[in-house]
Every structure is written in structure tokens, then in C-alpha cells.
Image (cartoon, grey):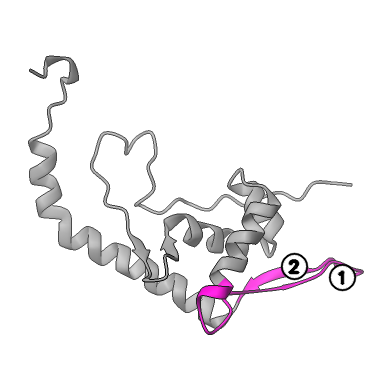
Amino acid sequence: MPQRKVQQIPRSPDSMTDSAAKTLVPVLRISFPDEDRLGHGKMELLEHIRATGSISAAGRAMDMSYRRAWLLVSEMNRMFCEHVVESQRGGQKGGGAALTPFGEELLERFRRMEKTMRTSLAEDLAWLEGKRNLEQGERG
């Protein structure tokens, strides 16, 4: 059985990469009163589901088991009064998954909140970055 090629999704600017490891990166995580959380990892999973049409392929793209990806989708669907992702079981047509209109809006609004956060914090983060001791061994 040929393996489906997984489309690479560019990581959110809030995600840590090797080149970004030397700069300060604010990370948005929303904690609900009932201890549910929504952050960049779940949003990245939604982006992969949108791109691949599959929870399994989205999980693979993130080096995550299908079970873990499915549990995260299930958690997001439970968190809101509308589903974020709809999925169909396999069969002759192979099943699949797609973001609901609410899921699309959730992803769009979350990314907008991240951008607003980065813009709002840019000056303070630049100041903080300037105060960092990059010579870790010279701390007193």
C-alpha cells in the first residue's frame, strides 16, 4: 500500500525552531476555568487536519500517534458547543476528517490573537532580550 505524502505545514511564528531558539518567543495558551487548555499545538494539529484531510496523517506529520491526535480532537470537540473537527469512518471511500466552519473560525481567531500578542509585546520583548546574559557561564 503506497504511503500518502504528508504536506509540510509551516510552523506558527510562536513555535520554537532552531533559528528562533536565540530569541524570545511569546506563546499563547488559553486556560479555561474547567482546566481545558487551547494552545499552539492543538492549532497546529488543526492546520495539519485541514491540509491532509486526515487525523492520522495530521498526527504523523507531528510525530504523534493516531490515538493522541484523536484524543486531542475529541477534547477540542468536547470543549465547545460546536464541533471543531468532523470525521468519517473508513470504508470504500476511505473516511477522513475536516474542520467545521466553527473549527476554521477558531483557528483563524487563535492565529489573530497570537499576532496581536506578538505585536503588543514586541517592544517589551526587545527590551528583555537586550537584558539577557548570553554568556551563561559568567553568571555570578
Q: Is residue 50 visible?
A: no
Q: Is residue 9 visible?
A: yes
Badge 1 density bin: few <14, some 14–19, many ≥20, Cα 10 Å:
few
Q: Is residue 64 above or below residue 19?
A: below
Q: Quadrant of residue 77?
A: bottom right
Residue placed most toward the observer, 79 or 13: 79
Q: What percent of the width, then of the height, locates residue 112?
A: 33, 70
Q: Is residue 139 rendered to the left or right of residue 101?
A: left
Magenta stretch containing residue 92, yes or no? yes
Q: Does the segment drawn in magenta span residue 111?
A: no
- In the rendered image, residue 6, in percent from the top left (x then y), is placed at 66, 50
* Residue where numbered disc 1 is placed: 93
131 above or below 126? above
Residue drawn at x 18%, y 20% is 136
Secondary structure beneath disc 1? Answer: loop
Within 10 angstroms of label 2, few (less than 14), some, or many (20 or more) residues? some
**In which image quadrant can residue 20 be found?**
top left
* Relative image position of residue 60 (x, y in whole percent): 66, 47
Q: Residue at x 24, y 62 (%)?
A: 117
Q: Is residue 112 above or below residue 105?
A: above
- Looking at the image, do the residues carrying marks 1 and 2 touch, with CB atoms under 8 Å apart? yes
Quadrant (top left/top right/bottom left/bottom right) for the C terminus: top left
Q: Secondary structure at mark 2?
A: strand
Picture disc at residue 68:
none
Most extreme residue toward the front is 34
Q: Which mark is residue 96?
A: 2
Looking at the image, residue 5 sits to the left or right of residue 3; the answer is left
- Amino acid type, label 1: Lys
In the image, residue 139 sits, relative to residue 130, either above or below, namely above
- The magenta stretch is 77-99
